[in-house]
Each structure stands twice: as C-alpha cells, then as structure tokens.
Image (cartoon, helix red, strand yellow):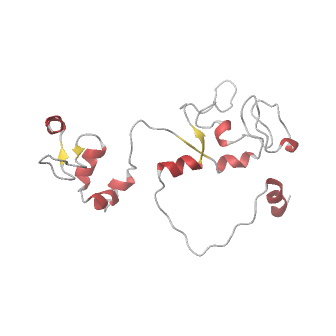
Amino acid sequence: MNEHSWRELVGEERPVGFDQVSIGVASSDTMRSWSKGEVKNPETINYRTFKPEKGGLFCERIFGPTRDWECSCGKYKRIKHKGVICDRCGVEVTLARVRRERMGHIELAVPVSHIWFYKCMPSRLGLMLDMSARQLERVIYYEDYIVIDPGNTPLTKTQLLNEAEYREA
C-alpha cells in the first residue's frame, strides 16, 4: 500500500507548508482540549489478559485501539466499521497508529510547575517573577507563601511568608 492510498483511507490530507514555528507554554484549558480523556488509574496492563487497563495509562478508550480496525472487546472487527465507537467497550474502530498521536490528561489537586522552569539557569520563572531560584523553590515546594495582593496590610507584593508569619497575617 503506497503513501497516498493510506492517507485517503483514513481521511488525512497532505501537510500544508509553513514559514515559521512558534513554541510556547500551553494553558491547562488548551491541554484539556487536546486530551481525549482523563487518566484516572495508575495501572498500565492487566497481568492476566495482557490488555490495557480501562482508565489507565495505556487505556484504549482514551488513546485508541491496540489492533488496527478492532475494538477492545472484539465486537467490531475490520475496516467496514471505520469510525464506529463500540457500545460495549467505548473504543473507536480505527488504526492503532492513532495511539502515537492522542493525548490524555491527569487532573491534579494542586497546581504544579515543571522543574525546567525554575532549575534551568537562568530561571525563566524567577526572571518573570523577579525572584531568586532559592526563593522560588521554597514557594513551589510549599515551604513559604508568596503575597499576591497585600490589600490593607503592611505586607508588600511578592513578599515571602513562612508558616508562622502567614498565620499572623
């Protein structure tokens, strides 16, 4: 099967030319829009069946089927069911290659920062907030609090407070 025919088969078009590339940090809403589902289970593969766990890191419902043109439970097989979402297992009948393109997300209880944003020198986050890497690290690891809006208090913006000072303020 040549390159042109499989693209027609799955409905992909040829890539469009471009003049420049821009790289930036995506917002949480943008990442959720890219996501095909939420990963709720830390498990990867069932040790008895050797199939991906539902809701896990390799979930077929989120990332796509492990076998071309076949749902997880086997109700739908072959290309004639292309694009159908199985009512039993919830897996879309498509190429297994989509697993390389699809993303899932994990909802976290608290905001987090990637280590590259404050450990790499110069610290990108530190430069934006006008803080040293050491001060920033204390805030990121919940050792200190940072004043965002001082209001009618003697505190100043971006002042760091330890636990005792925070309770008094």
Please provide percent x and percent y for residue 95. Answer: 76, 47
* Picture quarter with the N terminus: bottom right
Q: Is residue 143 above or below residue 31?
A: above
Residue at the farthest top position: 48
Q: Is residue 119 above or below residue 41?
A: below
Residue at the farthest right position: 80
**Residue at x-position 69% and y-position 31%:** 51
Residue 60 sits in quarter: top right
Residue at the farthest front position: 152
Q: Is residue 138 left or right of residue 39?
A: left
* Picture quarter with the C terminus: top left
Residue 4 sits in quarter: bottom right
Please provide percent x and percent y for residue 115. Answer: 37, 50
Q: Nearer the viewer, residue 123 or 25?
A: 25
Please provide percent x and percent y for residue 9. Answer: 83, 55
Residue at the farthest bottom position: 19
**Residue at x-position 79% and y-position 40%:** 84
**Residue at x-position 79% and y-position 38%:** 70
Q: Is residue 88 above or below residue 83?
A: above
Q: What is the number of callouts on the image? A: 0
Q: Is residue 120 above or below residue 151?
A: below
Please provide percent x and percent y for residue 67. Answer: 76, 40
**Residue at x-position 22% and y-position 52%:** 158
